[in-house]
Amino acid sequence: MTAFFLWIAGLPPLAQIPVILLVFGVVVALILFFIEFAPRPGRGYAIMRLVVAIAVPALLVLVLGVYNDAVWLVPVAAVLGAGLFLLDRRARGGRGSLLQLLAFMAPAVLLLAVGLLYPMIKTIVGAFFTNDGSKFVGFDNFSHVLAGTNQGLLALGNQIIWVVVTPVIATLIGLAYAVFIDKSRGEKVLKVLVFMPVAISFVGASIIFKFFYDYQQGNQIGLLNQVVVAFGGHPVNWLQSYPVNIALLIIILIWTQTGFAMVLLSAAIKGIPDEQVEAAELDGANAFQRFLNVTVPGIRPTIIVTWITIAIVSLKVYDIIAATTQGQNGTNVISYQMVRLFQNLPPQTGTSSAEAVLLFILILPFLIYNANNIRKQRLGL
Amino acid sequence: MSATDVEMPAIDRRAERRRERAISKAENAAFSDSKRRLSSPAATIAALIIAVIWTIPTLGLFVTSFRQPADINTSGWWTVVTNPNLTISNYLNTLNFKDTLTVGQSFVNSLVIVIPATLFPIAIALLAAYAFAWVNFRGKNLLFIAVFSLQVVPIQVALVPLLSLFSNGVTIGNWAVFPGLNLNGVDGSFARIWIAHTIFALPLAIFLLHNFIAALPVDIMEAARIDGASHGQTFFRIVMPLARPAIASFAILQFLWVWNDLLVATIFTSGDNFPITKLLTDLAGTYGQTWYLLSAGTFLAIVVPLIVFFSLQRYFVRGLLAGATKG
């Protein structure tokens, strides 16, 4: 595999696209081919199944590349494959059904296990070891990260400010906007204007706002300072003045997320039956009362989903800090600090992992809430 | 005879559609009165103010990207009203501006990263989503909840070990098992970032596609099975064509996500294969006041997602509505 990747790396960038797509296409075609022929009855197909069950795991190990002292993995994989074949012969759904199911699921499950689950566990374990991973140190990494001089406490505090403030304001403005433009003339255009930032990268948004906040000696070219000057004030170096800079950075994220909230909530508002609104109107409720007593209860689930989604985004924010202040002037957050620690030379793997675990703990309530919801949904079906 | 057989339902459908349109038009007319009452002038003005505030920052940088470099740093972009002196040379200069690589090259890199990284997860997730929806096996619910939960796991948690997996492989105790990909320092290799993006996209892809595929009418699937279609045929002939809208929605989400990504690119690309977001971030750090460069660079980076956004907005919104959990 390495040899193949090395070869493809030598091609000009644009030529790499068709080559890799072709190779990937062939692999997928082989999987589909096997899915189609696996469950057929008959001796010929049984032999084919046996060959595939033994050869694929062995080949997979070979293709990924083994060290010389681990060549034993190849026969082990082959034996495991043969075991699978035997299991399959006794499977409930008939011969071939288990192997077929594996062909459907194995690519995704293997990738997730290797690329998300294993790294996650390794990070959590790594948080309790030294940077080179040789010695168990208990909670030392955490106390080191959160010690006063290491910006950790500040980064944690800032991260919590981000996650509390951003979803509330973005959802509120998004909701207000969705209500204001609902059924008004030019609704589509008004929607697009606020929704557009959703498609813009955080890096792009950050540079747009960096220009907006720009500070110069003499003539101002940033609009914010120009407004300040127009009202007779003195221009401020916004991104360097703590703690205002935190608010200004959060505004960038709010700017990108409000459109998202607006679209979600607008769809929910349109889902409320007109009769309910009209009934409230007949009962003499004014616009605000109608909003509070009919609209809000009707879209409560959507409000919660919106809020959670934006909260999760603000927990992971890295790009905005990287493209603006790089954590200077008191704007550091965990999700940024964590990457920086890792990029130190030598990499501070232990402390970096500790930060990642802190981040994970912050996200855990949302994860549990979401998982619970989906569990209820699936069992309810 | 077969021709009429085929055409009859088509005509029926067309007539029905016409009828539906007429009905909705009548409804619109009936409600137009209450419509005007619902949008009070105060609300409209408030909405307009928000819309203007939301647009001005982008407009400012957009105008700036067309101004002479000398003008940009001496006068505000709003003076363009009285002193319009525009040029497109900023864009040409920016495309050829060389940092670790030129902005134009990084634009190409973004393309090379985004196209496979969008298609890979779709293919892999479609297979898994079909099995989750229409194949019965023990532990299905549990596995599905696990995959769903992985959606919100911050990728920060997985980045570092995944990188070391790519470069150092795995050793269990004293046994060196996998040597890893050994692509460190191989400029021009996109393998690591393709794989990383594919893996990180899978939970959302499986979830979105599963929701759609599971909602396909049971009758169709039953009919296919009675006709003797295997899972393979059902997947290929029925599910894949019908799932096209869901595939489109996810493809757009994933395209924008990968194109706009900075974090994964920071970890898994180096030197020659930086995408445009990474290069822009570096430029913003090094040339913080060179606004002709940053403004034109930003709009070069934004233009692709905006084209996708404006041409395929409907699918994009649908994707957002269906999978409002990805960050």
Image (spheres, grey):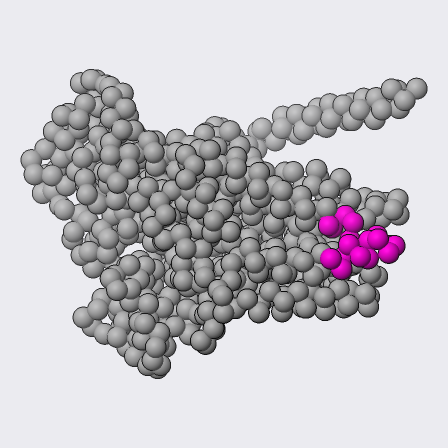
Q: Name the residue at the right extreme.
A: B1
- Nearer the observer, A236 or A323: A323
Quadrant containing the N terminus of chain B in the rendered view:
top right
Q: Position of residue B50 (x, y in %)?
A: 36, 38
User: Which residue is drawn at the image coordinates 20% and 33% (left, top)?
Assistant: B291
Percent position of residue A44, x then y:
84, 53
Examine the rendering and report whether any part of residue A281 can be seen.
no
Which residue is nearer to you in this view: A126 or A361? A126
- Residue at figure coordinates x 35%, y 45% from the top left: B187
Place residue B10 in its image quadrant.
Answer: top right
Give the residue at the far left of this rendering.
A218
Residue B168 seen from this side: yes
**Residue A257 placement, left or right of B66:** right
Q: Residue at x 61, y 31 (%)?
A: B31
> Magenta segment, principal secondary structure?
helix
Q: Which residues are magenta?
A: A34-51
- Indicate whether B98 appears above or below A295: above
Most foreground residue, B285 or A237:
B285
User: Does A42 lie within the magenta span?
Assistant: yes
Q: Is residue B229 above or below residue A329?
A: above
Image coordinates of residue B87 in percent, x first then y, are: 24, 19
For residue B271, which quarter of the picture?
top left
Give the residue at x 58% y 67%.
Answer: A73
Q: Is residue A96 magenta?
A: no
Closer-to-camera residue (A91/B54)? A91
- Residue B78 occupies quadrant: top left
* Count of marks placed on residues: 0
Where is residue A366? Give x, y as percent: 48, 64
Residue closest to the far front: A68
Question: Horizontal placement of B193 versus B105: left or right?
Answer: right
Residue B245 vs residue A10: left or right? right
